[in-house]
């Protein structure tokens, strides 16, 4: 039986700004935004007192898993790259060779701006090989403006992504929970 991870998750047709965890970000029109938490690989569960949530774009045009920059990690997630495990492989993104990090990531299935505790309790772990999300990290002010969640991440997690552009909603469903 499929499990709904996100059902009818709305996105806006207009530019707007969102405030979160003492930061803010510009959200462009027609960008499906979800909320994620990233942490070092030794973290087994997330806690709103310890782990910050951040917005991420569901990007059907990005073939990778997760693309963040140093600002997302340090300022928004409160993580330093030195505390994270680097992978020996690199990736070519936006014409630059970028390092890959091992992170754990969770997708918040409820809006943390409305009820953070409930959002953290119902978080869906995003995993690939060995429970680790292999993320690409760009320099501090390099693209992307917001973290990107790509198609490989959804495929690795056996998620089915449905975008209803007329209603401006997305659905994520899976057949099993990890």
Image: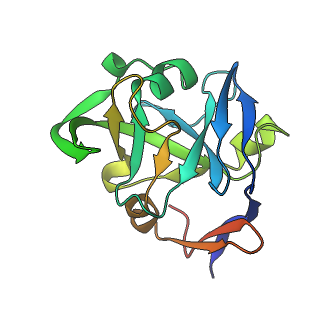
Above-or-below relation of 7 to 42: below
Return the residue nearer the eye: 147 or 124: 147
Total numbered badges shown on the rendered structure: 0
Q: Nearer the viewer, residue 96 or 63?
A: 96
- Residue 57: give x, y in percent of width and height: 56, 49
Residue at horizontal 33 percent and vertical 26 percent from the top? 139
Q: Residue at x 42, y 24 (%)?
A: 141
**Quarter of the figure with the N terminus:** bottom right
Q: Is residue 96 left or right of residue 27?
A: left
Q: Residue furthest left?
A: 88
Q: Residue furthest bottom?
A: 1
Q: Residue at x 41, y 68 (%)?
A: 155
Classify residue 117 by image quadrant: top right
Vertical side of 129 occupied by 117: above or below: above
Give the residue displayed 43% in from the left and 62% down from the top: 61
Q: Is residue 13 above or below residue 123?
A: below
């Amino acid at each position: 039986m499929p499990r709904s991870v996100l059902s009818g998750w709305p996105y806006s047709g207009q530019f707007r700004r969102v405030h979160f965890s003492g930061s803010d970000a510009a959200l462009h029109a027609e960008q499906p935004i979800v909320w994620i938490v990233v942490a070092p690989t030794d973290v087994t569960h997330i806690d709103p007192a310890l782990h910050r949530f951040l917005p991420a774009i569901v990007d059907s045009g990005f073939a990778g898993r997760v693309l963040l920059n140093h600002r997302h990690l340090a300022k928004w997630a409160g993580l330093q790259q030195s505390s994270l495990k680097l992978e020996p492989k690199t990736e070519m993104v936006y014409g630059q060779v970028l390092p890959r990090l091992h992170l754990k990531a969770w997708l918040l299935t409820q809006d943390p701006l409305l009820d953070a505790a409930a959002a953290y309790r119902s978080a869906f772990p995003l995993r690939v090989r060995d429970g680790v999300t292999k993320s690409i990290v760009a320099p501090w002010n390099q693209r992307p403006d917001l973290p990107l969640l790509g198609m490989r991440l959804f495929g690795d997690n056996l998620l089915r992504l449905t975008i209803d552009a007329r209603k401006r909603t997305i659905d994520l469903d899976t057949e099993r929970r990890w």
